[in-house]
Image (cartoon, grey):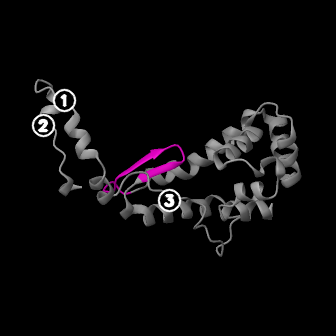
Amino acid sequence: MELCLRLVLNGEIYSYISNNSDAFGSMKYKDLKKSVLTIFNADKYAGEKKDEMIRLFPNLMKWVFDMKNKSGYKSVSKLGHKTEADIFVEVYKNLPDDIFSLIIHDCILLTKSSINLVREKLENRVRELYKEVIVPEDNLEKLFKVSLVSLTDKQLINTQFEDYLKTLEIDENQEIATDFKWDFEDI
């Protein structure tokens, strides 16, 4: 349990699996994650990868299989979805109205200026939900990833976006397009 907690808190669960397993070692991150989640969530799963997960995390996998046997195979994915909602939806609902935010599954899209606020709220929510497991000294900085999902102003200007707009033929009779203006200075 301690190993799993440390791996999750340090954002290292998939690298640990990859580095300690021949069955998973050569897989790309996306495929590795899909394979691991399939083992957790599938009705029935047999094979080398399942055996490897049992070898790497015997107690966790016993808990997963016990839960599936007791409550049905969908219970594991339902718990995962509920956990994500308990964290992300609750944080999202309590964000200030004056910041841009949009929730998508286990992600909150926002502007750079709100990253620290939202990260702090996510970390506080996790500490609140798992106070029996996470001690105050635990660093949660790597628990949530921050990724750039759009271009910066400078990148946008440097792309061929303006050229692309010029190639569009806009019918002056279309209400939607008549007042369309893209002003890079306002971004």
Q: Quadrant of residue 127?
A: bottom right
100 in the magenta segment: yes
At numbered mark 3, what does the secondary structure look like: helix, strand or loop? loop
Q: Are marks 1 and 2 in contact (CB under 8 Å)?
A: no
**Which circle, 1 or 2, is nearer the viewer?**
1
Relative vertical location of residue 56 with respect to residue 34 in this rendering, above or below? below
Disc with the residue nearer the chain's start (2 vs 3): 3
Q: Which residue is mark 2?
A: 179
Question: Percent x, y for residue 25?
Answer: 77, 52
- Distance (Cα) linking label 1 and label 2: 14 Å
The span shown in magenta is: 96-109
Instruction: Left or right? Give the position of 28 relative to 120.
Output: right
Q: Amino acid at mark 1?
A: Glu
Around disc 2, counting alpha carbons within 10 Å, would you say few (fewer than 14), some (14 to 19), or many (20 or more)? few
Q: Amino acid at mark 3?
A: Val
Instruction: Left or right? Give the position of 98 relative to 123.
Output: left
